[in-house]
Amino acid sequence: MVIKTDELPAAAPADSAREPSSQAGGKGRPGAAELPSVMLLNGDCPEGLKKEAGAPEPPRENGLDEAEPGEETTGQEVIVIQDTGFSVKILAPGIEPFSLQVSPQEMVQEIHQVLMDREDTCHRTCFSLHLDGNMLDHFSELRSVEGLQEGSVLRVVEEPYTVREARIHVRHVRDLLKSLDPSDAFNGVDCNSLSFLSVFTDGDLGDSGKRKKGLEMDPIDCTPPEYILPGSRERPLCPLQPQNRDWKPLQCLKVLTMSGWNPPPGNRKMHGDLMYLFVITAEDRQVSITASTRGFYLNQSTAYHFNPKPASPRFLSHSLVELLNQISPTFKKNFAALQKKRVQRHPFERIATPFQVYSWTAPQAEHAMDCVRAEDAYTSRLGYEEHIPGQTRDWNEELQTTRELPRKNLPERLLRERAIFKVHSDFTAAATRGAMAVIDGNVMAINPSEETKMQMFIWNNIFFSLGFDVRDHYKDFGGDVAAYVAPTNDLNGVRTYNAVDVEGLYTLGTVVVDYRGYRVTAQSIIPGILERDQEQSVIYGSIDFGKTVVSHPRYLELLERTSRPLKILRHRVLNDRDEEVELCSSVECKGIIGNDGRHYILDLLRTFPPDLNFLPVPGEVLPEECTRAGFPRAHRHKLCCLRQELVDAFVEHRYLLFMKLAALQLMQQKASKTENPTSLENGSPPSSESKPEDPPAPEAGSKEEGSSASGLAKVKELAETIASDDGTADPRSREVIRNACKAVGSISSTAFDVRFNPDIFSPGVRFPESCQEEVRDQKQLLKDAAAFLLSCQIPGLKIGIGELITRSAKHIFKTYLQGVELSGLSAAISHFLNCFLSSYPNPVAHLPADELVSKKRNRRRRNRPPGAADNTAWAVMTPQELWKNICQEAKNYFDFSLECETVDQAVEIYGLQKITLLREISLKTGIQILLKEYSFDSRHKPAFTEEDVLNIFPVVKHVNPKASDAFHFFQSGQAKVQQGFLKEGCELINEALNLFNNVYGAMHVEICACLRLLARLHYIMGDYAEALSNQQKAVLMSERVLGIEHPSTIQEYMHLALYCFASSQLSTALSLLYRARYLTLLVFGEDHPEMALLDNNIGLVLHGVMEYDLSLRFLENALAVSTKYHGPKSLKVALSHHLVARVYESKAEFRSALQHEKEGYTIYKTQLGEDHEKTKESSEYLKCLTQQAVALQRTMNEIYRNGSSANIPPLKFTAPSMASVLEQLNVINGILFIPLSQKDLENLKAEVARRHQLQEAIKNRDKAEEPMATEPEPAGASEDAASQPPAAKDPSSPSLQE
């Protein structure tokens, strides 16, 4: 596919070379119709995907049996997308013709983008493409161009400029001049972000297969920097952003800016003048340039004298670059060198990300003159598309129109999802810019006479409101605190309804921005809403939290279609006139029909049921699990709700219980041949939340796996028969299902169907007398969910004290900042950071008046930013006061008692790091600080000065539209891989990559997951070069879209290091592992379970290059960390002992080696038994070590006896082979290779397929069953796993060998 570098929906990365994955043909691809119904995740995807795919799918009876939009996909449709590419020849002025690979479904404008990116044609912007003398339309697809085929010649024809085209040209030249300059990434503009991988890989890894670095054991400098070594207390900040040598600027020009003589006067317009530029060349020559319809030329104007006549040399050039080449030799030389460097960079370092990523640190940078940046600052460019000049975008119309696009087949769905994603990313960027303008006081309020907190704003067709409780709207829910929380709850509701994607039901574009202590909600505007009162507009729901409630049949019909997937119960409430009103959402959800006739829903803040642990209700008693833990606890607001993931997990848990109860009853019936349903007739569920016992009969382990499978399969079949209501089920079977339904709280008595009433326990909401039994059941269901959260979900989480401290500090910082004027921001932030993190006991705030003295005090302006009173209260904060407030906040908000009064005590008691706390508070609040070493522990001077605070960025929450078809392919590929069908899995993942590229463009976190899995598959199949290429892209993308020190980025570095080692690039592998360790130290510190895996990797590589002492430092640290987090008897610890023993063996220190291997052997023997292959392997190794030790001792005795004349055979200390080191690396990273012949492999695949079919009854129903079962996994389970094909194991999960 042809590539694009701007924001246009891209089909592949912006590089004229084609991606290998994008040429994968479409033949023989299974469509979603034949995809396996059980999707087993490989455990190696980012959180976003895990949430969707890793969590078990909700049971189909509970509403997901309706066809997904992507379910009718066929292989034929995929072929449509994968049309065969072909080559065309490009003829451009002044250069040799060249050929370009294109694809039929691309548009002509995509070829334009490629030409504007190529080194030899990048200086052209204003041209058209001609085929046989006919101009091609910019927006037509190549397949619709008559006569365009393999070998066709496309001619580049220069077109006359307009003012718009001239501006685009100047902007493009400026972008080319700044292409290696990282300042836009540090400043967080134009979706630029940072990447440092190339610093550690010394450029591109693409030719790694040919470049065998270190294979012949060339001397490699393996010594890590001192601060990376285990036990080091130093945590420097500067290595986070190493200086890239490409950033040293190649200065082409000193100044390029708009001239003060713009715009041209009328008589010059009639000569074709469009605008004037002023340039100072590197040789200090000052020139004025005219941009005319025919191109660019020098004129005779000076700074103070206007003379538009051409100057000599009278050279007219269609491109500004060509003109500058003529007048400045330095420009010509440096511009060519700059473009050469630019195109050598990996495309993923250059492409814009879909959403802006901000950096919390930046080096000191020179502020250079930049005409485009200056122009952008004073125009709302984001609101105007250049193809509709002067016309503001109607965001609401764009957002809703894209949702209305057809979606009957795959190409239509791709087009629709691409449009939805593009509009959402544009809307998020515009909303962020508007929210910052509102808080900075640069937007006029639509109600300027009201108090600042109550003001609302419209900018660029977006409505902005502040997170305060205006008009006591949230009085019963917690006032301002509730008003601050409500926008994020509302955003979660919008995300959920968007994901269900019901035709005819519309939500508002919503973005929540936290900036300078304020929360701003940005929303698209319903047509006509501003012209009428809300009371008249709302035809469904309530505007006063349940007092007056109205309903509407069309809304009930639309919301009914969302109720099954969202598990929302249709219910009745009473209004203020005691009339029954039917709803299918919470009462706060409002329905408004816009002037465009669309049905909008808004205020979705109570889409999910409340969390009763934080909502004390008089007269209601929670289950024992809750009361034992001290719940319910009063919280600051009453809007605490259960997350969607928790609701899904709870329903899964209930479904599993339902299946087991029904299976148990069926078994009992079968055994006794008599009806015996009494055990469940009372309908109250056993306290399932406290780990229910498994039903004894089918699952006690005495029967074969098949019998339990068949029991559940019968229940499934029975449930489907009863649900279909065809009368074939006998009454006893119906009774079984009815009892099971009642026991788990199903709203149906014939099928499993758990739903929640979101209005239960809502203050002010009343229910009719006739519904009291249903209300009682719903209350019980919510109590059970609250208990499930405490007993089943939370035990899997670990409290992070550092997180708790930084969140408490963030809450305080939010109100602290609201009292600070813009001129005092850097002083206030640096003072807060000193109080929070510096050991200096008495930091003094510098008030902004220090810099300037005003002769007269300004009167208070009317239009000041919200809350900006003349307030210097922030300046009197002390460290003691701040830490007292943090401890108080931790107790009040999180009910956690912090035992510390200063930062130094917190660091000492809880083992925290100040640098980690600094990173966390900066990311949470948007602070950007100067990249330098801070002396936190100095008691003589504060750590921060106001010069250290560089910027404050917004923290943005938004909707993430999904590529549904691509995601289906991705899941199918994972399932195939886990069944051992690597080739088929690889094809499906490649297909998913193409579809993701089609929807998201080249950069997205889900594309990152695709690339990671492809890399691992290629590695398993022995194609190291392809593995390296894909993993390099995954690292670059993770750095760009998640952040350079994000935990996922650290993992990507570790995977890349493994593939580098396998490709014999040893020094690169070490550089990458050292980088990963530095980032882990910065983000988490040494005391983290992941550090064991990282140190094992580093230790093994160092062992491989015979750096034994260094290797031991890392491996022994890994052993200590594993012992701490997994216990001294864990299999991970046994593996660690073995790795340490191998290094001691290489050093000929056999006593230490034997000691460690004995420890490992004991663990294996205890955990796995004497007959397990791991125990036997360890036993063999012990014998080998003993023999070597005995041989060494004999030799030593010989020396003692005979002195120097002893005849000693040379001792054989073999260095470890690279193959053995790689084998161990694979084991610790969860990759198992099993040597099999082709025939064995085929037989194994057939066996796997047979087992898969046998167990489909359970798996299709409940992918989560095995992890949730309470019986212990038999010891031999992992032996079975080890006999699966190479990829059948979960590549990222710990295997038994660990």
Image (cartoon, rainbow, N blue to C red):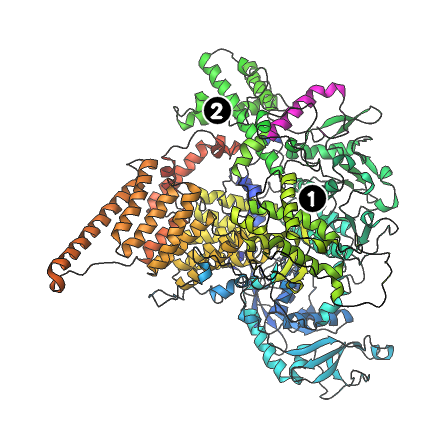
Which residue carries the number 1 mark?
488
Report the quarter where the C terminus lies: top left
Q: Residue furthest top?
A: 674
In the image, residue 687 sits, relative to residue 4, either above or below, namely above
Q: Specify the amino acid type for callout 2.
A: Glu
In the image, residue 189 sits, relative to residue 689, either above or below, namely below
Q: Which mark is residue 693?
A: 2
Q: Specify the amino acid type for callout 1.
A: Thr
The main secondary structure of the magenta stretch is: helix
Q: In this orientation, which residue lies closer to the viewer: 300 or 1220? A: 1220
Residue numbers of the magenta segment: 761-786
Residues tagged 1 and 2 counted as in contact (Cβ below 8 A): no
Q: In this orientation, which residue lies closer to the viewer: 476 or 501? A: 476
- Residue 124: x %, y % from top left: 66, 73
Q: In this orientation, which residue lies closer to the viewer: 64 or 134? A: 64
Task: Report the residue at 69% width, 23% height from top.
Answer: 619
- Residue 1218: x %, y % from top left: 33, 58
Report the quarter where the N terminus lies: bottom right
Within 10 Å of the Cα at label 2, are there few (<14), some (14-19), or many (20+) other Cα atoms? few
In the image, residue 915 sits, relative to residue 1258, either above or below, namely below
Within 10 Å of the Cα at label 1, are there few (<14), some (14-19), or many (20+) other Cα atoms? many
Task: Report the residue at 59% width, 81% height from top.
Answer: 333
- Residue 112: x %, y % from top left: 65, 66
Q: In this orientation, which residue lies closer to the viewer: 1188 or 724? A: 1188
Q: Is residue 431 left or right of residue 579?
A: left
